[in-house]
Image (tube, rainbow, N blue to C red):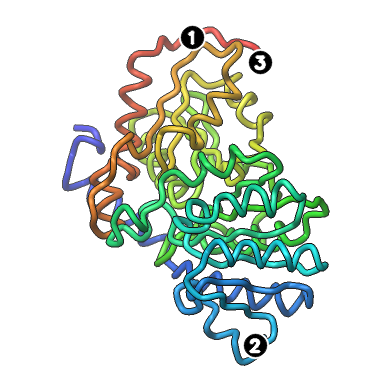
């Protein structure tokens, strides 16, 4: 019996894989990364909507009281104030929940920031199902679709707390007058990157090599993609894993290069299957690549309310589910599939 079909062995294998990747609280990491950025850049101002504790900023008050702006529960004002600060030469970082930064304040993100070509970092914490117990008002599965549709908006979804720090620094150092949306989690997530891991906005990171299949993922799903690749290896399937941390501008070269040598592709995201990373990958492959692409994400319906890990498992956003989906997909693809050009 294969590993994927043996429940007892599978549970043991998955537990060992996860145990090898310690977890760290995303909010705590965001606070630490903001402290480091504010120490390095005196022009950085944090703007939040009564979420000092929830975004990890509370510990910064003693040191940076004059560079922390709390507008109260007024996310539209939060983003508008940030745009004003940017227009005055500051580098504002909006520190809010993804659900409110991208939905309640979407007009301000579009008009005040992007249209006016102002450099504002829009940090959206508690993305996806990371605040699963908050229900549909706080779960965020449409933010990537919304933000990547805004011209002059960069969209980045770091894969773990370490990459969060790299992404924040990279966003701050971008020379262009463009807003950046950082899609961040909330509670503990597994760490897979080393502190000095390479990071560049717009450049995917290949984490595993494979000639049968390519798994493309971002955010917390990168760890699940690595777990899926590990499980597929036991099935004799070699899976490449791409950490597509930047959804816009997406790394077209990495996707097209993978498409030259794999038989199929699976895109995994803790986001709606409508308009997110899967849609972005298909837009790259829309010409000349007649091979199967499976999108693993949140279907076009409201997820239930519940703890994050249980919701991910129930919705198929876990390594074993991804591996089974990939195995089934490859079962329908001839091993001699002709590779198409880009």
Q: Nearer the viewer, residue 228 or 28?
A: 28
Q: Residues within 10 Å of mark 2 (few under 14, many from 20)?
A: few
Q: Quadrant of residue 121?
A: bottom right
Q: Position of residue 53 (x, y in %)?
A: 46, 79
Count the marks: how many?
3
Q: Label 2's element?
A: helix
Does 113 sit above or below residue 286? below
Q: Residues within 10 Å of mark 3 (few under 14, many from 20)?
A: some
Q: Mark 1 or mark 3, which is nearer the start of the sequence?
A: 1
Side of 66 relative to 255 (left or right)? right
**In front of the other: label 3 or label 2?**
2
**In front of the other: label 3 or label 1?**
3
- Circle number at residue 93: none
- Circle number at residue 337: 1
Contact check, label 3 and label 2, Cβ < 8 Å: no
Q: What quarter of the picture does the N terminus occupy?
A: top left
Q: Quadrant of residue 202?
A: top right
- Circle number at residue 342: 3
Q: Position of residue 225 (x, y in %)?
A: 43, 42
Label 3 to label 2, Cα distance in Å?
52 Å
Does 216 sit above or below residue 23? above
């Amino acid at each position: 019996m294969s590993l994927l079909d043996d429940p007892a062995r599978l549970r043991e294998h998955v537990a060992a894989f996860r145990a090898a990747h310690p977890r760290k609280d995303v909010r705590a990491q965001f606070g630490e990364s903001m402290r480091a950025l504010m120490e390095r850049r005196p022009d950085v101002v944090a703007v939040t909507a009564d979420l000092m504790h929830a975004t990890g900023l509370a510990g910064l008050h003693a040191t940076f009281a004059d560079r922390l702006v709390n507008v109260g529960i007024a996310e539209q004002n939060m983003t508008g104030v940030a745009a004003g600060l940017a227009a005055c030469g500051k580098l504002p970082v909006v520190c809010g929940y993804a659900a409110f930064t991208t939905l309640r304040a979407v007009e301000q993100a579009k008009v005040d920031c992007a249209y006016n070509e102002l450099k504002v970092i829009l940090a959206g914490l508690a993305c996806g199902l990371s605040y699963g117990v908050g229900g549909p008002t706080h779960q965020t599965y449409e933010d990537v679709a919304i933000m990547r549709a805004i011209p002059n908006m960069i969209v980045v979804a770091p894969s773990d707390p370490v990459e969060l720090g790299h992404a924040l620094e990279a966003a701050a150092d971008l020379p262009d007058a463009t807003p950046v949306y950082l899609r961040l989690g909330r509670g503990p997530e597994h760490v897979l990157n080393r502190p000095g891991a390479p990071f560049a906005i717009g450049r995917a990171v290949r984490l595993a090599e494979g000639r049968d299949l390519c798994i493309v993922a971002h955010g917390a799903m990168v760890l699940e993609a690595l777990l899926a690749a590990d499980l597929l290896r036991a099935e004799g399937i070699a899976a490449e894993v791409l950490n597509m941390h930047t959804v816009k501008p997406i790394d077209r070269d990495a996707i097209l290069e993978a498409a030259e040598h794999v038989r199929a592709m699976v895109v995994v995201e803790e986001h709606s299957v409508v308009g997110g990373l899967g849609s972005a990958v298909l837009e790259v492959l829309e010409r000349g690549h007649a091979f199967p692409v499976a999108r693993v994400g949140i279907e076009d319906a409201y997820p239930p309310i519940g703890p994050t890990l249980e919701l991910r498992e129930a919705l198929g956003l876990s390594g074993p589910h991804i591996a089974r989906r990939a195995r089934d997909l490859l079962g329908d693809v001839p091993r001699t599939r002709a590779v198409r050009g880009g």
